[in-house]
Image (spheres, rainbow, N blue to C red):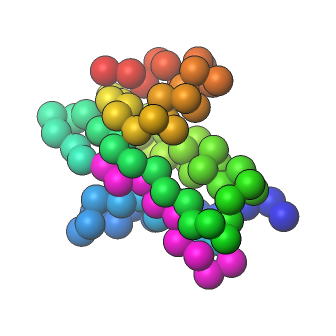
Amino acid sequence: MNYADNDIIDNEAIHNFEFFVDGHRSFIDYKTRDNRIYLIHTEVPEELEGRGIAGIMVEKVLTYVEQKDMKLVPLCAYVKAFLKRHPEWNRLLA
């Protein structure tokens, strides 16, 4: 199944980017300050593991960050690993 068509939701009230697949919620915790976004933690429920959901979600969030003309501060281990595999996104780093 192609989950890339699913939308990422910016739930500002709880500082989460949310991504729903098959009724399950994946998310990335974040904080913002001075036009910088700090990606703190990525979580995908066990039911969705192994489907590439985390990578799709991170890419969608990075696209959102770029569209908002923000700078990225990756604190999450998964996001840091993603950036190592996809250095083209390093242009967003603060």
The image shows residue 62, relative to residue 88, as above or below, that is: below
In this rendering, position of residue 93 left or right of residue 1: left
In this rendering, position of residue 36 left or right of residue 76: left
- On whether residue 88 falls in the magenta region, the answer is no
Is any atom of residue 78 visible in this view?
Answer: yes
The image shows residue 57, relative to residue 20, as above or below, that is: above
In the image as oriented, which residue stretches furthest toward the bottom? 23
In this rendering, position of residue 26 left or right of residue 4: left
In magenta, the rendered stretch is: 22-30
The quadrant where residue 22 appears: bottom right
Q: Which quadrant is the C terminus positioned in?
A: top left
Q: Position of residue 16 (x, y in %)?
A: 36, 60
In the image as oriented, which residue stretches furthest toward the left? 34
In the image as oriented, which residue stretches furthest toward the front? 46
Q: Which quadrant is the N terminus positioned in?
A: bottom right
Q: Kindly identify the residue that appears in the image at 34 percent across and 34 percent down.
A: 75
Q: Position of residue 83 (x, y in %)?
A: 54, 26
**Principal SS element in the magenta part?**
strand
Q: Kindly identify the residue that appears in the image at 49 percent across and 46 percent down.
A: 61
Q: Kindly identify the residue that appears in the image at 68 percent across and 59 percent down.
A: 49
